[in-house]
Image: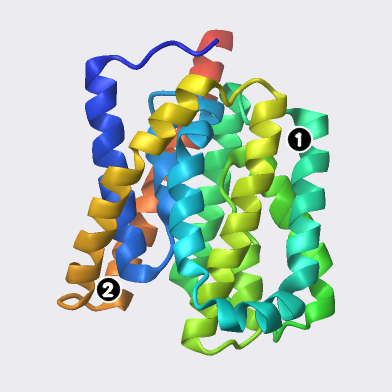
Amino acid sequence: MQAALAPWQWLAVIAIFVVAGCVKGVIGLGLPTISMALLAVFMLPSHAAALLVVPSLLSNLWQMRPLRTLGPLLRRTGLLQLGTIIGTLLAGLVWGAPAGAWASVILGVVLCLYAASGLAGWQLPAGRPRRGLFMGLATGVVTAVSGVFVIPAVPYLQSLKLERDGLVQAMGLSFTVSTLALSVNLAAAGAFQLADVATSCALVVPTLVGMSLGGALRQRLSPQAFRRCFLIALLVLGVYLAAGVLLAGASRHG
């Protein structure tokens, strides 16, 4: 049973979803990544992932538009989506919902890898749809253990050389599938309870406020500059999450 949020935690959670929504409004991704990174500073990753389910699902369903182009896109990325479902559910059976100190370490490492690859400009070689199953399986495992589903799905989708709107739609589709699969894991582990559903629904409002702010900011700020700042912030948070747990463990055994 998860403890109720203290008043200061409520304020922090609302602020985090505004910030994460703003990031998504500017660059088209980052809601689960930044939310998980910041929420995991003061709550279990499993609880953070539960709060994220409804805002992530609704924002990604919105990003999946227009529906008329969804069919061809699904055929092109179907193996990625299938692999993501299988990988997430199988990893959930093995490890359960992301929880405990090591979940924070894994989340920190994933954030560092994602940020470092983005800052370095690393790209996967030209992708082929049939590689999608392997990439999906890997994405599913990362999703299940960390609650973040950008690695390696986003780099793989970028390697398919989709046009800009197609890439944004493909990310929305991939994130929707990951969110649904992760919610199954959370429910099976008892980490997604009725109170979490209500809280997660309430957090749609600050998420939409943030996305509106991000959309306005996108008109004034270079998305490339904003993304660089975003990646640097993720790198710092990733190091903090991973190193903090490891140093705490070392001091207890020292």
Indicate the position of residue 120 as horizontal and vertical percent values: 48, 72
Residue identified by numbered label 1:
92
Alpha-carbon span between mark 2 and mark 1: 36 Å
Name the quadrant containing residue 160: bottom right
Seen in the picture, residue 3 relative to 31 is either above or below; the reply is: above
Q: Residue at x 55, y 22 (%)?
A: 193
**Residue sitting nearer the eye, 207 or 99:** 207
Q: Residue 189 appears in which quarter of the rendering?
A: top right
Confirm or deny contact between disc 2 and disc 1 (CB under 8 A). Answer: no
- Inspect the image, locate mark 2, and give the three-letter code of the amino acid beneath it: Ala
Percent position of residue 143, x then y: 65, 46
At mark 1, the secondary structure is helix
Question: Between 153 and 199, which is closer to the camera in this rendering?
Answer: 199
Residue 210 vertical position relative to residue 251 in the rendered view, above or below: below
Which residue is at a point 55% across and 18% down the rendered structure image?
A: 249
Q: Nearer the viewer, residue 254 or 67?
A: 67
Residue hosting label 2: 225
Residue 224 coordinates in the image, percent (x, y): 32, 77
What is the x, y in percent for residue 36?
46, 40
Number of marks present in the image shown: 2
Disc 2, SS: helix
Res 131 → quadrant: bottom right
- The residue at 28%/68% (across/down) is 226
Q: Quadrant of the N terminus?
A: top right
Front position among marks 2 and 1: 1
Give me the residue at 59% from left, 83% from top.
69
Q: Amino acid at mark 1?
A: Gly
Q: Residues within 10 Å of mark 1 (few under 14, many from 20)?
A: many
